[in-house]
Image: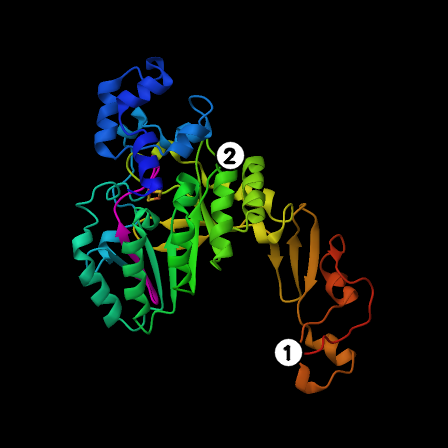
Amino acid sequence: MAEWQKLLHDRGIRTLRQLVDKFGPEHFPDLPRLQAAVDNFEFRISPAMVDLIQEPGDPIWRQYMPDLQELEVIDGVVDSLNEDADSPVPNITHRYPDRVLFLVSPVCAAYCRFCTRRRKVGDPQKIPMAQLESAFRYLEQHVEIRDVILSGGDPLLLSDRRLSLILGRLRKIKHLEVIRIGSRIPCHLPERITPALCKVLAKHHPLYINTHFNHPAELTPAAVRALEMLADAGIPLGCQTVLLKGVNDDVEVMRELMQRLLTARVRPYYIFMCDNVAGVEHFKTNVEKGLEIILGLRGWISGLAVPHFVIDAPGGGGKIPLLPEYVESITESEVVLRNYRGERYVWTQPREEALVEAGAPESDYGSLPLFNNEVSLGRNNRSARSGNGNRKPTRRKRQ
Ligand code: SF4
C-alpha cells in the first residue's frame, strides 16, 4: 500500500461512529436518520479535511458532513444534467461536439455532500472499471473528439500504474489532442501528489488538470505544495469552484480564494451555480448572489483571477455563462457601459458620416471604428463620459 493510501485508510473518517467519537454526540442527535443520508450517498472525510474543520457548521464541515436536509427533496432531480442521456457507452458522456467526459474512477478521497454526480460516485458498480474497453473503442472510432476529460470520482485516486495505462492508451489515439483531468485530490489528499505521479502525468502532455477548491482555508501549505509540484511538471492548472450556501456565498471569501489560487499557480476557471440535484438543495443560493460575486471580483482583483460564472443548464443544455450587466444600452451610434465601479462610459460605434467629414477614403466606410467625442455625445448622452477627450474625427489604423 502506498503511503497516501495508508494515510487515507488510517486517518480518514468513514463511519458515523467515528464522527461521533471525533466531534461529540451532541452534534448528531438523530443518528438513524443520518444513517439514511449516508446510505443514500457514500460518506468519507479525508485526513486533510478532518484537520481543517474548526467547529461544527463551518465551511469545511458543511461540505462533508452528512445532513438531515439531504433527505428533504423539493424539486431536485437525481441526474440533474441528464448526463445519462448523452452516454453512448458506459463511462462516456458525449455532449459537446469535440470533447467527451470519460469516467475512470468511482471513488474520491472525500465525498462532497453537494456532489452533482452523487448518483454514481462512491459506488464501484455504477462506474464500472471492467467496462473501460467500450469507452476506449468509442474514443478511437470518433475522430471528431479532440479533447477528453477524465473524471469520476477522482482519477488521481487511481494507482500510478493504472493511470499510466489509461493515459498511455489515450495517447495512442491520434485525433485526441488534449487530455484533461478533473481532480479534487490537491485539496482532499495533497499527499497523493508524489514525484512518481508527476512523472507519469508529465509523459502525456498536453495534459491539463482542473482542480476544485471552494474556500481559501483549503489552500493549506500541503495543498499549495501539491499544486506547485504539478505546475513544475508542466501541467497547466485550472480550478472550478461551486457556489455553496454557508461555504463561499460571500464576495470577500471568493476574492481571497481566487487571489490565493492565482498565487498558487492555478487559474480560476469556473464558478458553478450549485446544480439542482436531489439531496443537495440546501446548498443552493440564488443566481443574484453569483452575479454579485462576479461584480465584486471583476476589476477588484487581477483579471487572471476572475473565473467564468456559469449555470450548467438543467436537463443537459450545457454550460451557460452569466455576466452582470455592464452594457446599459446599444444604439447605432454608441454603447453606454458601466465599469466595475458602476461609472458610466460611452464607446462610439463606427460612423460613416463622420468618416466623410474627416475626408476618409470611401473604401473605409462602414468598417472602421471612429472615436469622436462630439459625434458620440452630441445627440445622445452628454452626461456619460467618453474615453478619448475632444479629438477630431480620426480613423483607427487597421491592425
Ligand atoms: S471530489 Fe468531485 S466527484 Fe468526488 S464527491 Fe467531490 S465533487 Fe463529487
Q: Measuring 51% from the left and 55% from the top, which residue is drawn there?
A: 232
The N terminus appears in which quarter of the rendering? top left
Q: Is residue 93 visible to the viewer in this orientation of the structure?
A: yes
Residue 34 placement (x, y as % from top left): 26, 23
Q: Write down the quadrant of residue 22 in the picture.
A: top left
Q: Report the label total.
A: 2
Magenta includes 225? no
In the visual, does 130 lie left or right of 263? left
Figure quarter occupied by ligand 1: top left
Magenta includes 101? yes
Q: Measuring 25% from the left and 18% from the top, which residue is drawn there?
A: 31
Q: Neighbour class for label 2 at 10 Å: few (<14), some, many (≥20)?
A: some
Q: Measuring 40% from the left and 39% from the top, which residue is drawn there?
A: 188
Q: Is residue 275 above or below residue 245?
A: below
Q: Mark 2 points at which residue?
A: 217
Residue 10 placement (x, y as % from top left): 31, 31
Decide which of 345, 82 is in the foreground and name it.
Answer: 82
Say whether disc 1 or disc 2 marks the residue closer to the N-terminus. Answer: 2
In the visual, does 145 lie left or right of 242? left
Q: Mark 1 points at which residue?
A: 366
Kindly identify the amino acid type of the residue bearing the numbered disc 1. Gly
Q: Is residue 276 visible to the viewer in this orientation of the structure?
A: no
Which coloring applies here?
A: rainbow
In the visual, does 9 lie left or right of 202? left
Residue 376 placement (x, y as % from top left): 73, 64
Decide which of 284, 116 is in the foreground and name it.
Answer: 116
In this view, the residue farthest toward the top is 26
Give, as a single range, the part of the protein colored magenta. 94-115
